[in-house]
Image (spheres, coloured by chain):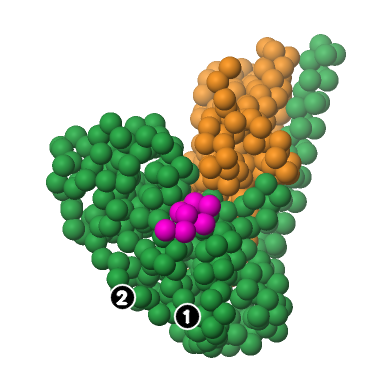
Chain colours: A green, B orange
Amino acid sequence: MKTKHSVLALILAFALILSLAACGSSTAAPAAAGESAASAGTETAGSDVIYRTLDEIKADGTINIGVFSDKNPFGYVDENGEYQGYDVYFAERIGQDLGVKINYVSTEAANRVEYLETGKVDIILANFTVTPERAEKVDFALPYMNVALGVVSPDSRVITDLSELGDGDEVIVISGTTAETYLIENNPEIKLQKYDTYANAKNAIENGNGVAWANDNTEVIAFALQNPGYTVGIPSLGSQDTIAPAVSKGNTSLLEWINDEIKALGEENFFHQDYEATLVDTYGLDYEESLVVEGGVPSAS
Amino acid sequence: MPDLGFEVLLKGKNFARLMGGLWVALRISLISVVISIPLGILLGIVMTWKNPISRVLTRIYLEIIRIMPQLVLLFLVFFGTTRTFGWDISGELASIIVFSLWGTAEMGDLVRGALISIPIHQYESASALGLSSGQTFLYIIIPQTIRRLIPLSINLITRMIKTTSLVLMIGVVEVLKVAQQIIEANRMASPNAAFGIYLTVFILYFLACWPISLVAKALERRWQ
């Protein structure tokens, strides 16, 4: 009987602690949310503007830049936890010339537009391909790279034309990329296998979940160069596109500053240096002229 | 032994980064568990009330949370609150809010199920013995309910830990995101690293969830 009592006492104590914790945490959580709401509210109360202007960023001393953290060699994190890559090389220069610190935000292909629409980042520098649909929601600056779509497939069955795809064949794409939009619009009959992250799509092609992987041609060229047994059967699909920084819709002060910066950097051949520092290991020198856009002027190719 | 790319883990701060990512995942899930278990118990009790208004309200809450995928909830709380109210909450806070809402709903339903599973004769025997309704709850119903709840809530807690892999979609760098970053950063030098890193992540998740199962087993044995 005695042990039974002590067990009951334990349970009661447990229940008591839980209910106390309930009061504590239930009041703590809304309070924390309320606090951040209040501080954000004062900033946005005056106007419905969600973005920060150039002056506000400078005054704050920190710029939020959305980059990929798992897309080597454009935006990735090295073994010391530092952001690296072609996009990051440019971001570092932006931070330096603005005289502000950079807060990198790890973005995914599918949430880049959302980040700008909510002003949670100031600039997206995440291999962002310029498309008319996206341009309705965000403002693109001048381009700094060329890109087209490409399709890579295993050597055992190289797809050189989309018409080779049979009924049961599925093509791997990453959600929110231009490859996905292009295939849905132009080849709705093709079955797509969609993955949220680059890493998952890569695993999928390596495991043979789909017969081919459609993505930006830079990606598939790099993938085929690094992974023996895969060939880029379709190196250029659809139209030639460009990659550009993007800011929230209407953030003209920041947009103009970035455009001036890209033009000025053209004088010193900045993006060629960027290519040679970050991309040359992946693509070799052969692709330098076709991939790099200097001074915001895409070469007619 | 095949090359699993474990050497990548020893490069630079990679292993420490992976552990840091695990800590982020555990912090989000455990804070949410601490919030949602007591709230869930209260919700479960409210759900057994016969009051039609409380029944409808709790039902709606439960169904909304249960039908919506957690990813949608994360996007709604992280981006939606900024769009609608202009709040700028961090990804981690948004995750904790979503996981607490989810945990409370599921825990509430588990508690409701456990409470109504106590046979009516338990209540009747208690009152025949002269116990008041408060005493009936404290000495008869709650002990039996908690015993029934343990395996179910352990299930929920481990599920919450594992579902933190979704928070990478709102920019929170947790263990799986760190793993993907490490794999990608080394995709040229160690193309096989994906196996080794994912295996390590698997072991880390296992090590995080295993002690919880052990505690549950010990408690169950003790209260048998």
Task: Using the image, determine if residue B67 lies above or below residue B220.
Answer: below
Label 2 element class: loop
Where does residue B20 sit, x and y in percent of width and height?
Answer: 71, 44
Q: Which mark is residue A295?
A: 1
Label 1 element class: loop
Where does residue A34 sit, x and y in percent of width and height?
Answer: 66, 67
Look at 75% across and 27% down and name the residue there.
Answer: A11
* Amino acid found under the numbered disc labelled 1: Gly
Look at 30% across and 71% down and name the residue there.
Answer: A301
Specify few, some or many for label 1: CA neighbours under 10 Å numbering under 14, 14-19, or 20 or more.
many
Which chain does the residue under circle 1 lie in? A
Outermost residue to the right: A2
Look at 63% across and 27% down and name the residue there.
Answer: B203
Which chain does the residue under circle 2 lie in? A
Task: Using the image, determine if residue B155 lies above or below residue A237.
Answer: above
Among the 4 quarters of the image, the one containing residue A237: bottom left
Q: Camera-side residue: B114 or B196?
A: B196
Distance (Cα) linking label 1 and label 2: 14 Å
Name the residue tied to disc 2.
A300
Where does residue A54 sit, x and y in percent of width and height?
Answer: 60, 85
